[in-house]
Image (cartoon, rainbow, N blue to C red):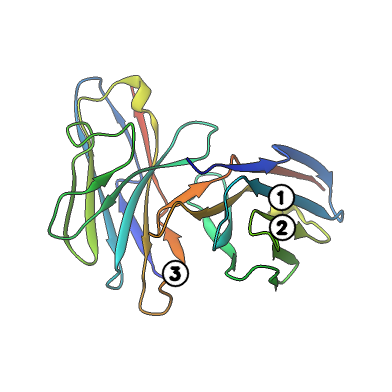
Amino acid sequence: SAVISQKPSRDICQRGTSLTIQCQVDSQVTMMFWYRQQPGQSLTLIATANQGSEATYESGFVIDKFPISRPNLTFSTLTVSNMSPEDSSIYLCSVAGTPKNEETQYFGPGTRLLVL
Amino acid sequence: GQQLNQSPQSMFIQEGEDVSMNCTSSSIFNTWLWYKQDPGEGPVLLIALYKAGELTSNGRLTAQFGITRKDSFLNISASIPSDVGIYFCAGPLNAGNMLTFGGGTRLMVKP
């Protein structure tokens, strides 16, 4: 499986500020995704991070609120902009299309965000 | 859109007991995945199922891909305290790799 790291692992932020979360994979992967997991809830897909082009967002998520970058096949960032307490969640990076397994999706450890 | 209905939502069992949880959908899935999420961690893949009717084991875990492609179950035999966590089923939303997740089954094991 792929080894995925996320930074920061957790943060406490003030309302109105923005936070950028980084996701690093130890091998080149085809697909990278960002999910949100609200407290006590399941995972919801935010967007697919596309290398060299704009991310593909799911219904209910927009680029202005969650800008995403993917400069290469091993790295992506998610920014949570103009944060409010409702943005308090775990944000998870996941990847698919590793050299050993094209279909299986693996997750990073998550970034725990608390907005005050 | 496609939705996965996972049950039960939670289970509180005695150590040593067997556990069974399942997922159903009104849509056909070509892949079923079962993940476990420990507190403070990201989901970890337990078992992946790719063929209808497939039965796959991973240690004390056994999962099956329903023949109709609309359901799957996960069994855990002889549960131990470290089995505590949230178990999620998941399947691809469409032709891409984007996953939709079930609501999760929270498992608690009493020593």
Under mark 2, the amino acid is Leu
Report if the CB atoms under discs 2 and 1 are less than 8 Å apart: yes
Which residue is rendered at x = 41% and y = 79% of the image?
A100
Q: Judge from the rendering whether residue A51 lies leftward or rightward of residue B38; answer left or right.
A: left
Cα separation, mark 3 vs mark 2, equals 20 Å
Element under label 1? strand
Residue A113: x and y, percent? 35, 34
Sequence order check, earlier mark of 2 and 1: 1
- Identify which amino acid the numbered label 1 is placed on: Asn
> Does residue A101 lie above or below B99 as drawn?
below
The dot on residue B74 is 2
Q: Looking at the picture, how far across and down is residue A98, in whole percent?
A: 36, 73
Task: Find the distance from the CA under tag 2 to the CA under tag 1.
Answer: 6 Å
Q: Quadrant of the C terminus of chain A?
A: top left
Residue A103 is tagged as 3
Task: Using the image, determine if residue B90 lies above or below residue A57.
Answer: below
> Which SS class for mark 3?
loop
Category of crowding for the residue at label 1, using alpha-carbon neighbours closer than 10 angstroms: few (below 14), some (14–19), many (at least 20): many
Q: How many marks?
A: 3
Q: Residue at 27% across / 60% down in the picture?
A: A24
